[in-house]
Image: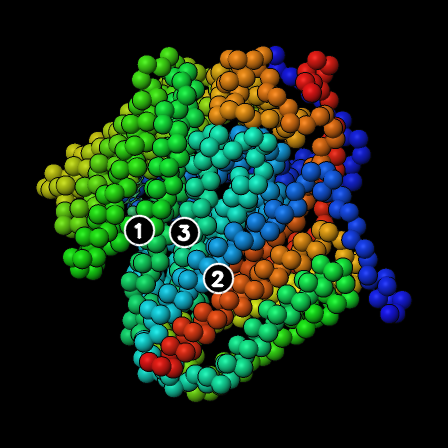
Amino acid sequence: MSAQSETTRVALEHETSQELGLPKDHRILGLWIFLAGECAFFASLIGAYLGLHTGVAHGPTGAQLFDLPLTTVATLILLSSSLTVVLGVAAMQRRDVRGMQIWLWLTALLGIIFLEFQGYEFYTFYHHGLTLQTSAFGSAFFTLTGFHGLHVAFGVFWILLLLFQSLRHGINEDRTTKVFVMSLYWHFVDVVWVVIFTLVYLAGKVS
Amino acid sequence: MAAITERVAIAHSEARSYHGIWAWLATVDHKKIGIMYIYAALFFMAFGGAEALLVRIQLWQPNNHFVSAETFNQLFTMHGVTMIFLVAMPILIGYINAIVPLQIGARDVAFPRMNALSLWLFVLGGIFLYTSWFMGGAPDAGWFNYVPLSGAHFSPGAGVDFYDIGLQITGIGTLMTAINFLVTILNMRAPGMRLLRMPMFTWSALITMLLILFAFPPITVNLILQMMDRLFHATFFNIPLGGNALLWQNLFWIFGHPEVYIMILPAFGIVSEIIPTFSRKPLFGYESMALALSVIAFLSFMVWTHHMFADGLGPIVNSIFAITSMLIAVPTGIKIFNWLATIWGGQIRFTTANLYALSFIPLFVIGGISGVMLAMAPADLQYNDSYFVVAHFHYVLFGGTLMGALAGLYYWFPKIWGRLLNEKLGRLNFWLVFIGFNVTFFPMHILGLEGMPRRISTYAPGYGWTTPNQIATVGAFILLAGMLILLYNLIRTFAKKPDLVQDPWDGRSLEWSIPSPTPEYNFAQLPLVEDRDAYWVAKREGNGELPKAEPVGPIHMPSPSLSPFFLALTVVIAGYAALLHVDWLALVALLAVFWQIGLQLVHEDHGYHVHPDVPAGGAAE
Ligand code: HEM
Ligand SMILES: [Cu+2]
């Protein structure tokens, strides 16, 4: 174990705000409530998609475009990032800061790979004649999956910020809550993708 | 009941301190934020009121040309948007900010900086909406902004873009308020303050925040879809390319009906505080009141197509939604009877606050009855889009929400500002508003039944519409007189020295147990709550002192910060850039927004400490 990892392996300092009676888990409940609102947000977007996906006008349909093997790989990549973030949080709870950092790096990387898959998919769809402007199906598809992609991108950004914070300042109880809250968000984004994968891609290919 | 005077000595402060206007821009204190919500709502009310008066002048006589038809459309649209999003909701959120933490015995909200962000998104988003008047015209497709009228083809100007983007900005702020107060009420109640010991206003805030949490995402999505259509030529609402106009209506009313309850439940809460106080009796049927709030909230998500009866969705859909709509009258009726039972046999004091609260009951009942009439789907085909609907929603929103809000203003003014409003002027204010309101809006029932469509800029003579319209316009000026008296009362009261009276009404809940205006840390020692109406019980059965849950000690406070203000400002800049198609600026501003959110996510606030100075004898251990 190098000296460097010794310095990052900072013992969890006792959180000062806790002594002062500032309950710190507001953020956890707050994030759960935020996710409830996000459920309503994605439910509305998915509802709009389901209402519009037959409106293909003169453009291509989902059944023509969707490349299930490709999307399945992307799905598996995103799902495995849920595992890596769990392992990161577990390492953090063992006070293994180095381990936490490695798993978080990996999570961010998987998120980025997922986004590249999505970029590739958008690019091929575009070349097969589906754009935001082609049809209501196109509008709804790009808006729904685009907003999900934005959520992934924001999650990657969030992970990277927390990583840099822990690299520079180590970790303390306040920051562990920050990481934990982020991991809840990340799981949510993954779960939403499972719903999108089922309702948009699988159902779209079947019909 | 000697007012405890507490002086504050800040022993050591790591926090930057701000002065003058910067202190207001940087504050994270829920009381100051509440005050700014109320000021801003009153400010926007002046604009919304002026728009209404112009509408009423235009309708004074047949074939009038006071304003053009185009201007008329902008006037009624902005009137509706203003009153709903910039007046009714913010003034109620202002009271919730100022009072709920006090009622539950908390020192602040769960996320003070996010609270400031909510405020600034509302204020700057509202200003953003209003600049549309100088930038090519205000929104003009009605407050529910139906497609295809609001689409690029029929509304080519930027007005609807201002609506789409402005309401997204204020809406995100409202959503954050919901998260904040849900956590605050669930997590930060003083020891012993069980859910079923909370004052009814806090209950109403809790349920309202749940409604916001689930109602605002659908409208946000709707606004995003329309923005994509209008700015990026997407085809969500473009029917030849597969779009669907009913999608807008559905998403709008899935939000829209809960929204009307978002505006009325806090008013229920206010009335449920004032009536017991001025009847000197506990609220009758407390549990059933809380339950009724919850049932109403639940049902309010299941009635939205009663706004779409005229779409022809078929008899099955219409019947189901007619029944669910009428069902809401049941919990609402329970509330009405509980208020009446609270008044029954009480020692009633007719203060201005109580006059407003008492007038709420019959006015709201009239609005409820016309609501049930509208909910009868076959009959609604007659009422729909007529002045009858206008009469209905003004009885519930003006007679309900605004009367409740004015009741709350007179009631909590001494707590929030440390001064009592003048009661004589208050009574004059009340009677002018009460009479003016009924003179303005009652004739609209008749106009509607006689077939006058809403939103027409003028009408021909000979339909019998002239006289009711003229009565309504006269009423509007009586209302104006009433509101000017209120303004005079406010100015007079601010000019005088603070009374600093702690408990002017012989109040029941915790906010009256602490000085007015409240010190920044609210409670020198957190109270221990052992009863519903804990302060009332302490006054009747003890020495008026609540038992304390903690010894005197330094109190940790969050630091003030300008970052919420600048974050909101950046959001608004992104809004202008998108609207004006300055794409690079929109992108830069959006990236700046995300960067600032990121900074908030890693931010660590150490806050500072305040030492409450409790005079000898005042400190019960
Ligand atoms: C018993 C309770 C109620 C019932 C059954 C009811 C029913 C209805 C119905 C059926 C309509 C649609 C009429 C039409 O457009 O043809 C309507 C409109 C409306 N209601 Fe109610 N209502 C009730 C209470 C309330 C309350 C408490 C509020 C607000 C505080 C409210 C605010 C509105 C508004 C703003 C509109 C008009 C929306 C618009 O078209 O611009 N209602 N109501
Ligand atoms: Cu409704």
- Chain for disc number 1: B
Sooner in the amino-acid sequence: mark 2 or mark 1? 1
Residue underneath mark 2: B579
**Label 3: how many residues lie within 10 Å, few (<14), some (14-19) or many (20+)?**
many
The label nearer to you, 3 versus 1, is: 1
Q: Nearer the viewer, residue B106 or B71?
A: B106
- Chain for disc number 2: B
Res. B428 image quadrant: top left
Give percent across and percent down for residue B348.
Answer: 37, 14
Which amino acid type is shown beneath numbered disc 3?
Ala
Give percent across and percent down for residue B185.
Answer: 53, 39
Horizontally, residue B253 falls left or right of residue B17, namely: left
Ligand 1: image quarter: top left
In three-dimensional space, the C-alpha distance between marks 3 and 2, rounded to whole angstroms, equals 25 Å
The label nearer to you, 3 versus 2, is: 3
In three-dimensional space, the C-alpha distance between marks 3 and 1, rounded to whole angstroms, equals 12 Å
**Label 2: how many residues lie within 10 Å, few (<14), some (14-19) or many (20+)?**
many
Callout 1 secondary element: helix
Q: Nearer the viewer, residue B395 or B297?
A: B297
Callout 3 secondary element: helix
Q: Which residue is painted at 50% across and 18% down in the image?
A: B536
Give percent across and percent down for residue B326.
Answer: 23, 43
Sooner in the amino-acid sequence: mark 3 or mark 1? 3
In three-dimensional space, the C-alpha distance between marks 2 and 1, rounded to whole angstroms, equals 35 Å
Q: Of all residues shown, which one is farthest toward the right?
A: A3
Residue underneath mark 1: B302
Horizontally, residue B194 falls left or right of residue B152, namely: right
Kindly tell me whether residue B385 is visible in this rendering.
no
Which amino acid type is shown beneath numbered disc 2?
Leu
Q: Which residue is painted at 59% across and 32% down in the image?
A: B190
